[in-house]
Image: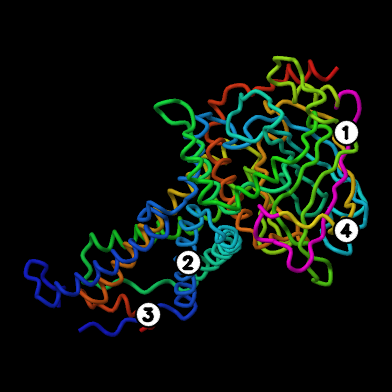
Amino acid sequence: MNPPQAGFSTPSRLLHWLMAAMILAMLFIGVGMAASESSWYSLLVSIHRPLGIAILVLVAIRLVNRLAYPPPALPETLPPLMRSAALASHMLLYALMFALPLVGWGMLSAARYPIVLYGSLQLPPILPHDVMLYALLRHLHTWLAYLLFATFLAHLGAALFHFLIRRDGVFESMASGR
Amino acid sequence: MSGPRLTMPTAGTLVRLGAIGAILLGVAGLFTYVGGWLSPDRLTQARMMMAVEEANGSHPGFRRNHAKGVCVSGWFEGSGQIRRLSKAAVFRPDRVPVIGRFALAGGMPFQADMPTTVRSLALRFLTPGAEEWRTGMNNIPVFAVNTARGFYEQLVASAPDPATGKPDPSKMQTFLANHPETVRALAIIKERSISSGFVNETFNSLNTFRFVNTTGASVPVRWSTVPLQPFVAESATQPATANKNYLFDELAAEIGRHPLQWRLTVTIGQPGDPTGDATLPWPADRPKVDAGMVTLDSTSSEDGGQCTDVNYDPLVLPSGIEPSDDPLLSARSAAYARSFTLRAGEAGEKPPSAITPKDVKAGDK
């Protein structure tokens, strides 16, 4: 028997579950508002922008936290293919958590929409006024969001697979920290 | 210990695998539902744009509505009288640069100017060091529909029949039978006096907004730009010309002679006045406050003009101006955003606009 493995640190788990809720909400708000012609539209947009920027700030903190508190090693028993898949999907999740808010901020900048967070709190544009660039980034934003949703599904599926099928403690290391 | 053998899964493992699959499928299904893909009857932005294209044809690179227009620029100077109602910095008694756009309603960028076609004025107020304000106004007293669904159904009813190339009158009759608010609104719209051109026309916000002052007090408002140029009725000057751009040519000529001015007039609603229905007018005796003067002293073609890459989204509002409960505001904002994204992606294939830089120069003499 292996000794009980130390799980994720408390700050890591806090960041993970907080951001999980925020990102999942963000994906549903995003896909809903992009289809909406209803009264919900403006409310969803006004949540989407500050929530996205909050995710950008948190993922930066999370990256620093990950360096400070490295995640526990995966179980020795995990086949190499699953090990590679875990590494690749986590790198992709981090890349998308940075890319989606930045592309969103950039596309609003290129369209010269005011980037209102709340009331008179606004962000400055980070790109020149260029509508063709806007169109490119707007489509990129959608496709990266679909990719993030697909990666999230894979992540959720893998977590449940560890929990219910392999029962190797990987799920618990994030759920309870043990 | 090695992991479970995948070659011989137990019944329990299969059940657990099935549970994982069901959870993933459920989450993916919910995402698909929220995105509108499972609801063919839901009015989405994409379906609204399809209806616009079926009614007007495909015009890559142009706005999906109010497609024919020109850019104008000038400034706004607040009267100072609005500051008790709204804390928005735009209402300070200072000059604020304005980038605007005059246009004709409809999605056909090369339609001939007609007196009865709805005219619009969109303005973008660029208050230094404060938030922007964008507004789109029309020369009608009320809007013809009060929901996005009404707008969509009106579009579908007015789309040309593929067989005849003309709208089917029976479809419009059915639409009107289902929308008594539109019948009432069209009667009011029909009674309006139409001016001879853009320069002596009044443009109205149609939708209701709310002004909020520094104490947090909020009042419902509608606003209009009222011309200082004297009103001349359209019928008196009906041009005997075949010039299909006569409205825009006259605008360029007038603005070349002298700056044009409109007073931004804010109407204050009373409790009980309809705020969530743009087909309903407010009583004529409602108090009006002079917010300041819009001066436009230059016009240019959309090709290379400063208004072209701007989405006149009615929900780009500074703090001090807030949306009302009018569902059309959200609907317009959503549809404009989708239209803007579509035309931005087509910017490379857009043909020259109806009013070219040469036309503006020729008029501007």
The residue beneath circle 3 is A175
Measured as percent of width and height from the top left, residue A17 is found at 45, 74
**Marked residue chain, label 1:** B
Q: CA distance from mark 4 to mark 1?
A: 22 Å
Q: Earlier in the sequence, mark 4 or mark 1?
A: 4
For mark 2, does the 10 Å Cα neighbourhood hold few (<14), some (14 to 19), or many (20 or more) residues?
Answer: some
- Marks 2 and 1 close (CB-CB < 8 Å): no
User: Farthest residue toward the left?
Assistant: B8
Nearest to the eye among marks 3 and 4: give it: 4
The residue closer to the viewer here, B111 or A115, is: B111
For numbered disc 1, what is the local secondary structure? Answer: strand
Please state the extent of the stretch shown in magenta in the rendering.
B255-280
Q: Is residue B260 left or right of residue A76?
A: right
Q: Which mark is residue A25?
A: 2
For numbered disc 4, what is the local secondary structure? Answer: loop
**Marked residue chain, label 2:** A
Callout 1 amino acid:
Leu
The residue beneath circle 4 is B82
Residue at image location 86% in from the left, 40% down from the top = B262
- Marks 4 and 2 close (CB-CB < 8 Å): no
Are the residues under marks 4 and 2 on the same chain? no
Callout 4 amino acid:
Ile
Figure check: B156 above or below A48:
above
For numbered disc 2, what is the local secondary structure? Answer: helix
